[in-house]
């Protein structure tokens, strides 16, 4: 295909709607996309005595290509990163640490255990986000961590949370770019508990303790991720959406993370964002794709992913809604899984930013809902894919030819 010709045409088509495709491309390039590090190896990480994946999340499938060591891991991560256009961050989990001999316990991790990531980030020109790992560990075996009734267990995880924020601060300082440290705990019950309040009261105390030390928000801010249910915590999750909304609003110690797979099937994250923006709240997103349950399928350019990006673009809020990814599919090539989903997110971003929102808002204000609906439908036929191709070409990221490795 002659991209120059195709792009010139696409540019003209969007210009008819008052949209400058060059401007959209440079905007998309600057929006950080935080790629989760854990699709590449099925959430295994680098701990020397690796623990089985727990916490009510699961990977399924047996595709070849599971990295056998750190070198293979980083090689494959880079392959995926190189397939995604635009500014990137890597979202690192605490189990992806440089253990050098004996792995430190989770409550003893130090920033230097994550120097490999700072080196990687500097070398590849990416930013970093961080996540404490409150699962896949014997001290999480009861199903409870920060909301555990066992003081020892709770204290262990509180220390892990505190140390994780220091890793985030270290990332931010080293890279001169703010890190978001996202706290997700698996705590919950399989069956309906009698005491629903107690664990939540303990969780408030635990987070207050974790967030007690002030860290310069230039380097690190924290996020807390809610969940509706997990495998084995179907009836009650301590850190529910209501819990975290209230926690974040009453303390302002953290921002909220909204994972697209963590809500009832007809409840969508795209519809929640304006309510967060109305209260000037930043949000971390885990763009994911739930299929019947919180299945963490590879994200596609589907209606909800488009709607999420539109909800951000329409409010010019890419500086407040931080886009990260979260899925794990072991049934297909792991590098491709990262790339397919991340490219889909970028495509939806491109498409959203190409929308003539001002015109649509005007039609809405005039009460012309007929034209609003008709135009939204017509816009779907415009060649946003060509604008994405041009973005890739400018970023020296392969277009459709990346597929040839897999055909
Ligand atoms: C689990 C949460 C969480 C995890 C990662 C691995 O349901 O979505 O974000 O996917 O921490
Ligand atoms: Zn998530």
Image (cartoon, rainbow, N blue to C red):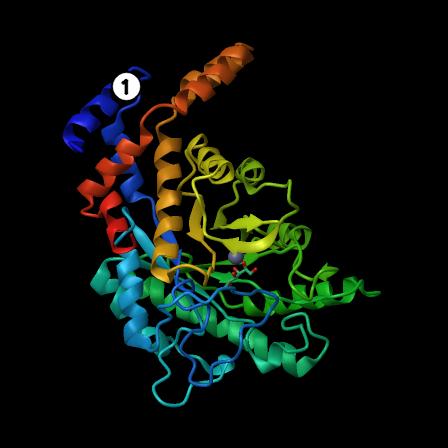
Residue pictured at 63% horizontal, 73% vertical: 145
Residue pictured at 26% horizontal, 68% vertical: 75
Residue underneath mark 1 = 13
Judge from the rendering whether residue 372 lies leftward or rightward of residue 335; answer left or right: right
The quadrant of the image that shows the N terminus is: top left
**Residue 322, x across and y down, in percent:** 43, 48
Q: How many marks?
A: 1
Q: Is residue 134 placed above or below 255 in the rendered structure?
A: below
- Most extreme residue toward the right is 194
Judge from the rendering whether residue 143 lies leftward or rightward of residue 175; answer left or right: right
- Most extreme residue toward the front is 407
Q: Is residue 99 placed above or below 274 in the rendered structure?
A: below
Q: Is residue 199 placed above or below 387 in the rendered structure?
A: below
Relative to the observer, which residue lies in front, 239 or 141?
A: 141
Residue pictured at 44% horizontal, 53% vertical: 325
Relative to the observer, which residue lies in front, 119 or 228?
A: 228
- Most extreme residue toward the bottom is 102
**Residue 12, x across and y down, in percent:** 23, 19
Q: Residues within 10 Å of mark 1 (few under 14, many from 20)?
A: some
Label 1, secondary structure: give it: helix
Q: Is residue 178 placed above or below 304 in the rendered structure?
A: below
Q: Is mark 1 within 8 Å of ligand 2?
A: no
**Residue 365, x across and y down, in percent:** 52, 14
Q: Is residue 259 visible?
A: no
**Residue 257, x across and y down, in percent:** 53, 52
The picture quadrant where one finds residue 358 is top left
Q: Can residue 103 be seen in this view?
A: yes
């Amino acid at each position: 295909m002659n991209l120059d010709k195709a792009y010139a045409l696409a540019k003209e088509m969007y210009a008819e709607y008052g949209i400058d495709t060059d401007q959209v491309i440079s905007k998309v390039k600057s929006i950080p996309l935080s790629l989760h590090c854990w699709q590449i190896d099925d959430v295994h990480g680098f701990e020397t005595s690796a623990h089985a994946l727990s916490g009510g999340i699961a990977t399924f499938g047996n595709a070849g290509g599971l990295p056998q060591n750190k070198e293979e891991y980083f090689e494959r991560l880079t392959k995926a990163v190189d397939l995604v256009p635009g500014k990137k961050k890597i979202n690192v989990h605490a189990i992806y640490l440089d253990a050098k001999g004996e792995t430190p316990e989770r409550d003893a991790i130090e920033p230097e255990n994550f120097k490999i990531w700072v080196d990687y980030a500097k070398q590849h020109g990416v930013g970093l986000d961080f996540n404490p790992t409150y699962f896949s560990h014997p001290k999480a075996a009861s199903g409870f961590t920060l909301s555990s009734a066992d003081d020892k267990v709770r204290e262990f995880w509180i220390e892990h949370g505190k140390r994780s924020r220091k890793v985030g601060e270290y990332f931010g300082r080293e890279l001169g770019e703010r890190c978001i440290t996202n706290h997700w705990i698996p705590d919950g019950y399989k069956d309906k508990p009698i005491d629903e309040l107690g664990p939540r009261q303990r969780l408030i105390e635990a987070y207050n303790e974790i967030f007690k030390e002030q860290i310069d928000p230039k380097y690190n801010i924290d996020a807390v991720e809610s969940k509706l249910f997990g495998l084995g915590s179907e009836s009650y999750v301590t850190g529910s959406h209501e819990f975290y909304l209230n926690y974040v609003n009453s303390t302002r110690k953290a921002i909220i993370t909204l994972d697209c797979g963590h809500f009832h099937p007809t409840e969508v994250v795209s519809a929640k964002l304006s309510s967060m923006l109305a209260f000037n709240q930043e949000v971390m997103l885990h763009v994911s794709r739930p299929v019947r349950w919180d299945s963490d399928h590879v994200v596609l350019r589907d209606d909800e992913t488009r709607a999420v990006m539109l909800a951000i673009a329409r409010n010019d809020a890419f500086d407040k809604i931080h886009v990260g990814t979260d899925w794990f599919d072991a049934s297909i090539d792991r590098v491709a899984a990262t790339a397919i989903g991340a490219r889909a997110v970028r495509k939806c971003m491109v498409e959203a930013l190409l929308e003539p929102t001002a015109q649509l808002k005007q039609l809405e204000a005039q009460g012309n809902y007929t034209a609003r609906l008709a135009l939204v439908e017509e816009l779907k036929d415009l060649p946003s894919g060509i604008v994405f191709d041009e973005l890739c070409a400018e970023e020296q990221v392969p277009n459709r030819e990346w597929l040839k490795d897999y055909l």
